Amino acid sequence: MRVLLAVLWKDLLSEWRSRDRVVAMLIFSLLVAVVFHFSLPGGAGARSQAQAPGLLWIAYIFAAVLGLNRAFSVELENDALSGLALVPVDRGYVFLGKALANTAILGVVQAVTAVVFALFFQLDLLPIALPLAGVVALGSLGVTAAGTLFAAVAVRTRFREVMLPLLLLPLLVPVLAGAVRATAALLQGDSAPWDALQLLIVTDAIYWIVSFLGFEYVLDE
Amino acid sequence: MSGALIRGRGLEKRFGRSVALRGVDLDVRAGEALAVVGPNGAGKSTLLRMLAGLVRPSAGTLLLGGIPAGRPGARAQIGLVAHATFLYPQLTARENLLFAGRLHGVAQPEARAARLLEEEGLADAAGRAAGSFSRGMAQRLSIARALMHDPPVLLLDEPFTGLDRRAGDSLCARIRALRAAGRTFLLVTHDLAQAAALADAALVLASGLCVRELRGAELGAAALEQAYALAAGTAR
């Protein structure tokens, strides 16, 4: 647990000092919102509103990929990644710390992006803020678990910027399917369908467990 | 050798089709300092990183205090100082040490960090970001980082690289002081005079093979130069 907290503290403090990751993710997701707003026929009409859940999650996922790439590239400076690999406990705790830090940073970006989408697509998010936050959290946990593992795999490859989305995006299909269905239901005034939530919960559990166990080997050179 | 703190037998490492180590044996007693020398590509750093648990052997066994290298129990016994400092430039010197201390479960990391900063002559720079440090200061902070959990074994991978003469001498004096305190050392270096002066024994590697082992009275700058020249010839 101490390793988890130490890595979480270090990542959030470093990000607070530099703010480079959160700013890049925010600018990117805001640009995506602007592009979608102007590229869809009918502007903020009913058809656009129907597409909003999918578009919102596309913005979330691509912003996450951008941030996850950066999460481990900072560890390459001064070969700090090797320093992390020397922890005298299972390296899975390093994964937990980094994945939770990634989830927190992504959460900030998602909150701002949701507000921008609400403005552009005339969505009333206030009445569903709480259940929507729950669905977004469930989706994000799956994204950051798989994303943190594969960012660590990709960081030592030659084409890491390209490698991460190639490895990660196929794995995010179940997360995207569950999260978009649940978000769409909430935006239509219904409750989130249980089967979509189940899909998210099971996917999250699998990704967190596999990533925790696999991280010991991922940090080997 | 009986009672070896570090014991390696038949160590091999392959990276795809290239072979970095070919059946190296290794024995280091507690409190002993072993220098590992050899031309570029000899497998020195691979051997050291194998000891640190960063690289898994393709074949052979490597034990630290009876525990296979790479296991958490073996990693706890290791402090690693390399050319790269493992420091986070956005964090201050003190925060870098606190982070290392927390990773290793040091009981009172603040007090330990303050003492090590004092010992390394960095107390005045404790609140400065590590990214603003000179190469010499960063290397001293890197040593403090490696010593945060008071490991019995210190691995030094070309620690003098990039240091000016004054910083190199200062690092040398620091290593001697740590040696006198009974710590076990493995030093990878290209500086044969420093290796002969600091170590009790030397392993000369070439193309992943151990071509010579020098111990005790055999180990001198001239003998090491000769063995190194032979190794460089073998590598060619």
Image (spheres, coloured by chain):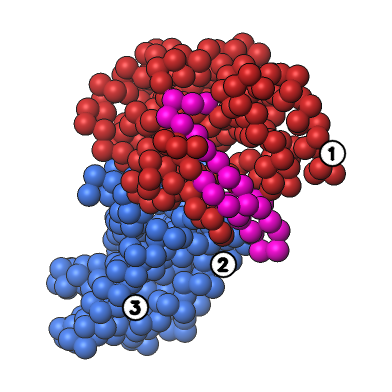
Chain colours: A blue, B red
**Residue B193 coordinates in the image, percent (x, y):** 69, 18
Relative to B104, is A203 above or below?
Answer: below
Q: Residue at x 39, y 60 (%)?
A: A215
Tell me whether circle 2 and circle 1 mark residues in contact (CB < 8 Å). Answer: no
Tell me whether circle 2 and circle 3 mark residues in contact (CB < 8 Å). Answer: no
Q: Which residue lies under the disc numbered 1?
A: B233
Viewer-proximal residue among A167 and A31: A167
Per the image, label 3 sits on a secondary structure element best described as helix
Using the numbered discs, state the Cα–Cα distance from disc 2 to disc 3 in whole angstroms.
20 Å
Q: Disc 1: which chain?
A: B
User: Disc 1 residue type?
Assistant: Gly
Q: Which residue lies under the disc numbered 2?
A: A163
Query: Which region is colored magenta?
Result: B8-33
| Residue A97 horizontal side relative to residue A27, left or right | left
Please, what is the dominant secondary structure of the magenta stretch? strand
Q: Which residue lies under the disc numbered 3?
A: A175
Count neighbours of disc 1 (C-alpha within 10 A) and say few if under 14, some if 14 to 19, many if 20 or more: few
Viewer-proximal residue among A91 and B110: A91
